[in-house]
Amino acid sequence: MGKSLKTWSLIKIRGREMAGEKITEDEIEDFITRHKLAVIDFSAKWCPPCKFLDRVIEEILPKYKQKDVGFAEIDVDENKKIARELGITSIPSIFFFKDGQMCVFADDNGHQHDRVVSALNKKQLTSLLDLLLEEDK
């Protein structure tokens, strides 16, 4: 990722338990519409950074579940079609959907991103979630 998340800002929203629910590509749309903010982590069982992110999500899950934030995990090895369609070439890749719409971010260099490709630590992930939830105020 390369940039500190605290310098990132949400610039627009584009249309179109365990650490998180295990879902398949057929269940994505339903999952996204069931939550105010949906976080979908594309990962794999063999991926050490993905396992780190699972532990982070597990730790913050109770706090954010109360705020209608849903966390889901999609195994890229078992769901190759959607991984290919989204152009996922590195994992973990995390997508955020607010009110059913994909979130797009800009870093401090003005580059736009529709996903975060990193095993975020607790501070990074909570900062990003708080930013997305703050947009409602």
Image: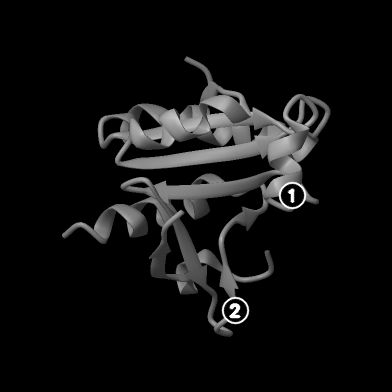
Could you say which quadrant of the image residue 36 lies in?
A: top left
Please name the residue that numbered disc 2 is placed on: 111
Q: Residue at x 76, y 30 (%)?
A: 44
Residue type at mark 1 is Ile
Mark 1 crowdedness (10 Å alpha carbons): few <14, some 14-19, many ≥20? some
Say how the picture is coloured: one colour
The residue closer to the viewer here, 137 or 84, is 84
Q: Which x, y percent locates residue 91?
A: 74, 45
Q: Residue at x 47, y 14 (%)?
A: 17
Viewport quadrant of the N terminus: bottom right
Tell me, for residue 72, which label it has, or none.
none
Viewport quadrant of the C terminus: bottom left
- Disc 2 element: loop
29 left or right of 65 in image: right
Mark 2 crowdedness (10 Å alpha carbons): few <14, some 14-19, many ≥20? few
Q: Which x, y percent locates residue 115?
A: 59, 56
Please name the residue that numbered disc 1 is placed on: 88
Q: Which x, y percent locates residue 126?
A: 42, 49
The residue closer to the viewer here, 34 or 81, is 81
- Disc 1 element: loop
| View extreme (left): residue | 137
Q: Residue at x 42, y 29 (%)?
A: 30
Q: Nearer the viewer, mark 1 or mark 2?
A: 1
In this rendering, the answer to whether 55 lies above or below 130 is: above
Residue type at mark 2 is His
| View extreme (right): residue | 46
- Say whether disc 1 or disc 2 marks the residue closer to the N-terminus: 1
